[in-house]
Image: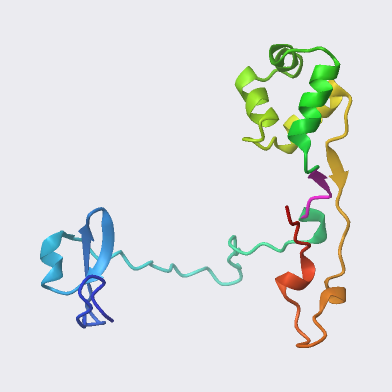
Amino acid sequence: MECEICGKPVPEHNPIRAKIEGSVMVVCKECSKLGTIQKAPPKPKFRQQPKGKKQKNTRTRNYSRRDEPTEELIENYDFEIRKAREAKNWSREDLGKKINERVSVITRIETGKMTPDTKLTKKLEKALNIKLLEEVNNVDLNQFINSSSGERTLGNIMKIKRK
């Protein structure tokens, strides 16, 4: 193990951790003088489980296709929202009152500085009578395997839009 400041060797069995300029680093004895020495983090204590009871593992989660979104916001949502609002001759204040949102939120959405979440998108769809969410198709990734190397790469899958 090496000092994160000067690169000198640091003993692995007893590294010195020092807070220097707001960052906790593993340092040598000389570099530890540049900051305040931190206590070693406490080691977790494992308690014995009674026999017959299984410990529930809360960290792992199995994801399935049902967890994946089935709808996606259209690409030019900001332009469509503004166009529909202006077609109804509504100001941003009027739209904000109808969907119970602040004018600043409407402004940020229409300028593309904010992406509305699904709940807000559905409120906008209903108020403006437009379609902002489109269905997402499941893609078979096996069709994108590169024939030369036989591997699937990100470049095989994505479509690059050029301006």
Query: Where's residue 99, x and y in %?
Result: 75, 19
Question: Which residue is at 68% across, 30% downward?
Answer: 109
Residue 144, by quadrant, is: bottom right
Question: Which residue is at 38% across, 66% downward?
Answer: 44
Q: Quick check: 136 above or below 16? A: above
| Residue sitting at the far front | 163
Tell me, yes or no, whether the highlighted magenta stretch contains residue 120.
no
Residue 123 appears in view: no
Q: Please indicate whether residue 59 sits to the left or right of residue 36 in the image.
A: right
Residue 114, by quadrant, is: top right
Q: Where, quadrant-wise, is the N terminus in this rendering?
A: bottom left
Please provide the residue range marked out in magenta.
Answer: 68-73
Query: Where's residue 54, x and y in %?
Result: 61, 68
User: 148 or 2: which is nearer to us?
Assistant: 148
Query: Where's residue 6, x and y in %?
Result: 20, 74
Q: Quick check: 2 above or below 113? A: below
Residue 124, by quadrant, is: top right
Question: Which residue is at 78% across, 28% downward?
Answer: 81
User: 39 or 153: which is nearer to us?
Assistant: 153
Q: Please indicate whether residue 115 sits to the left or right of residue 30 in the image.
A: right
